[in-house]
């Protein structure tokens, strides 16, 4: 049985960590352009890397926020596709998992 308070605290810590990383990347982009560097190839490459990281972090944040909402609704740990419980090991590895392994692989 899942300790919902511990899960909530863990998800909230992850949410805060991801939000901080997003803020750091966004702040770095502003600093990079403010320095007025002339090496546009490196600036473009850095911007592309930051954009990719930002996309990944945004997706992770969306998953965490959705997991917190499922927790509030009493649907946390229930597969959205088949309705069966998501195994604890999967939730430990991916706390914001929406589906059980079988449904995710399908």
Image (cartoon, rainbow, N blue to C red):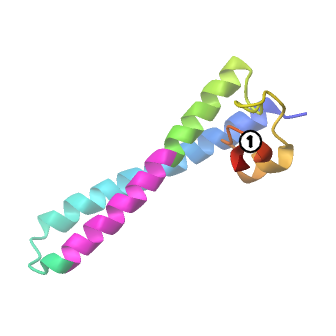
Residue at 71% in and 39% down: 99
Residue 23 is left or right of residue 32, and the answer is right
At 13% across and 81% down in the image, what residue appears? 39
- Work out whether residue 74 or residue 22 is closer to the camera in this orientation and state it: 74
Residue 19 seen in this snapshot: no
Horizontally, residue 80 falls left or right of residue 61, namely right
Q: Nearer the viewer, residue 57 or 79?
A: 79
Q: Position of residue 22 (x, y in %)?
A: 40, 52
Q: Which residue lies at the image location 46% right of the left edge and 54% below the top edge?
A: 56
**Which quarter of the rendering shows the N terminus?**
top right
- Image height of 48 relative to 20, above or below: below
Q: Which residues are drawn in magenta?
A: 42-59
Residue 82 locus on image (x, y percent): 77, 30
Q: Label 1 belongs to which residue?
A: 103
- 11 lies left or right of 46: right
In the rendering, at what x and y percent does residue 83 appear? 79, 27
Above or below: residue 105 compared with residue 47: above
Q: Quadrant of residue 102?
A: top right
- Residue 13 is left or right of residue 20, and the answer is right
């Amino acid at each position: 049985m899942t300790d919902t308070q511990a899960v909530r605290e863990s998800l909230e810590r992850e949410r805060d960590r991801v939000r901080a990383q997003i803020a750091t990347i966004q702040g770095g982009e502003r600093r990079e352009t403010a320095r007025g560097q002339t090496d546009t190839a490196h600036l473009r490459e850095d911007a592309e890397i930051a954009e990719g990281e930002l996309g990944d972090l945004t997706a992770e944040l969306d998953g965490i926020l959705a997991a917190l909402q499922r927790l509030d609704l009493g649907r946390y740990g229930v597969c959205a596709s088949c309705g069966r419980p998501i195994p604890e090991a999967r939730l430990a590895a991916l706390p914001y998992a929406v589906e059980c392994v079988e449904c995710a692989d399908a």
